[in-house]
Image: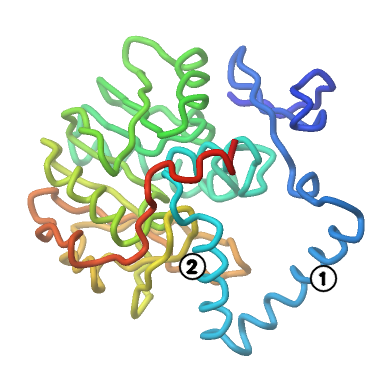
Amino acid sequence: MPVVYHSANVDMAFQSGPCLRIGTTTLPILPPYRRYRSLSHRSVKIVMQRIKPFFRRSTPRIYRALSRARAYGEFAFRSPEIIFTRFSQTNRWGSLNSHSGIGSDLEQTTELRRMLPTFIAELQCRSVVDVPCGDYFWMSHIDLDVDRYIGADIVSALVDANRAAFGDDSHSFMVLDLTRDELPPVDLIFCRDCLVHLSYADAGCALRTIRSSRATYLLTTTYIARDRNYNIPTGSWRPINLERPPFNFPPPLKLIDERCTEGNGQFTDKHLGLWRVADLPCDKSRRIGSFRNRGTAHRDQWQ
């Protein structure tokens, strides 16, 4: 089980902040306030955080447009590997329990941890690939009755830590980029909180990877009350409804209500939807998407 503790012996780049220990591996956490360059900069950030909800409610279209423009400037032309590795190193999502963010803590996964083992058993799935598996924090608190669990993630440091702490005969971990790497043959692809971070183009590539796998089922995140979807650069975030364009999934076979309480109840429609991989619509990744990250063109800016 990952444990959060404070240490003064971590790399100076992380300013002796709190760390996350996975087994015997120590991964530094950079809390949000460590990113502020000065006290005045921090004060401005606090003020902006307080007025943002009002701005979002009063002028939603302008707020969304400005957020997308800012995200595009931050993430464009960088590979998913660089983006999500940086997120893990700096604790971008602001959780002290998990490198994968607040949505992967024990509070937000209470219902999921209760229902998932029974759900998988009813499907008679004996092998599962969990992509992205993150730091395996909440998943380490449940016992899946499967013969083979494969945790896959694009962040190699998390994979190495998971492998050292949790790897055994039935649990393995691998580095995998869902937008371009082949998936191992399994019964179920569990893909929580992944497509919401990908541009249409990269989401199309990820879905093509899923469709070309030999898996039977896909269990993935969908926000069922959203009327429309919009594009983002990979690394940003937005809720998506997979039954709406441009994804156009058929109605799910089953739904798991996560009972999400993030955002003061803004995301209560967050569910995990189950589809047969064979029923997923044909590849439209060439048609959808205008934000495509261009490899490692600006790698130096992240390192």
Tell me residue 102's x, y (percent).
Answer: 60, 49
- Label 2 sits on what residue type? Thr
Q: N-terminal of the two: label 1 or label 2?
A: 1
Q: Is residue 61 left or right of residue 94?
A: left
- Which residue is labeled 1 in the image? 47
Q: Residue at x 69, y 28 (%)?
A: 28
Dividing the picture into quadrants, the one containing residue 152 is top left
Q: Which quarter shows the N terminus? A: top right
Dividing the picture into quadrants, the one containing residue 67 is bottom right
Residue nearest the observer in this picture, 86 or 267: 86
- Which residue is labeled 2 in the image? 268
Circle 1 or circle 2, nearest the eye? 1
Residue nearest the observer in this picture, 66 or 16: 66
- Label 1 sits on what residue type? Val
Q: Is residue 32 left or right of residue 72?
A: right
Q: Using a 10 Å C-alpha cutoff, classify the residue at mark 2 as few (fewer than 14 neighbours), some (14 to 19) or many (20 or more).
A: some
Dividing the picture into quadrants, the one containing residue 41 is bottom right
Q: Residue at x 38, y 55 (%)?
A: 198
Label 1: state its secondary structure.
Answer: helix
Tell me residue 281's x, y (percent).
Answer: 12, 60
Residue nearest the observer in this picture, 293 or 91: 293
Dots 1, 2 in contact, CB < 8 A: no
Tell me residue 14's x, y (percent).
Answer: 75, 32
Q: Residue at x 37, y 26 (%)?
A: 175
Q: Furthest-right residue in view?
A: 39
Label 2: state its secondary structure.
Answer: loop
